[in-house]
Amino acid sequence: TASEKSVVPKGVLIGLASGAVLLPVAITLVLATGFLFAGLQDTGAARVLNGVGLALGLTWAIDLIALVIMLGFDAARRAELDPKEPDEGE
């Protein structure tokens, strides 16, 4: 079955994929709020939110890298368990 072939737990892949989709939304909201505070002359809050936005951006980049690596591990494991010969005509 598919669960026996998977080397990466399904929850990990779902979590990484969810982060890849939801983190950009969070980054946008945090940075937009930071710009709003900057416009209101609250530089302290704007700096904090810009730092949080930067941290979220780095987290997103790490999440995308981890997702690609985990999907690669999963695909390699599945190919190892179910080898198929490549077609000559394609």
Image (spheres, rainbow, N blue to C red):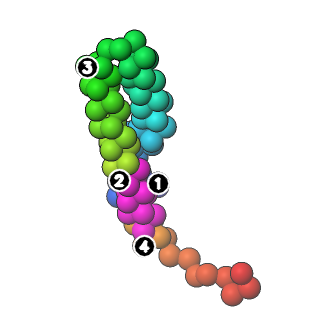
Report the mark closest to the observer, 2 or 4. Answer: 2
Residue at which label 4 appears: 80
Under mark 2, the amino acid is Ala
Residue at which label 1 appears: 2
Under mark 3, the amino acid is Gly
N-term mark: 2 or 1: 1
| Marks 4 and 3 close (CB-CB < 8 Å) | no
N-term mark: 1 or 4: 1
Local packing at callout 4 (Cα closer than 10 Å; few below 14, some 14-19, many 20+) is few
Q: Residue at x 38, y 20 (%)?
A: 38
| Marks 1 and 4 close (CB-CB < 8 Å) | no
Residue at which label 2 appears: 66
Give, as a single range, the part of the protein colored magenta.
64-76
Q: Residue furthest top?
A: 40
Say which mark, if any, is on residue 26: none
N-term mark: 4 or 3: 3
Under mark 1, the amino acid is Ala
N-term mark: 2 or 4: 2
Is residue 10 shown to the viewer in this render? no
Please provide percent x and percent y for residue 3: 41, 51
**Principal SS element in the magenta part?**
helix
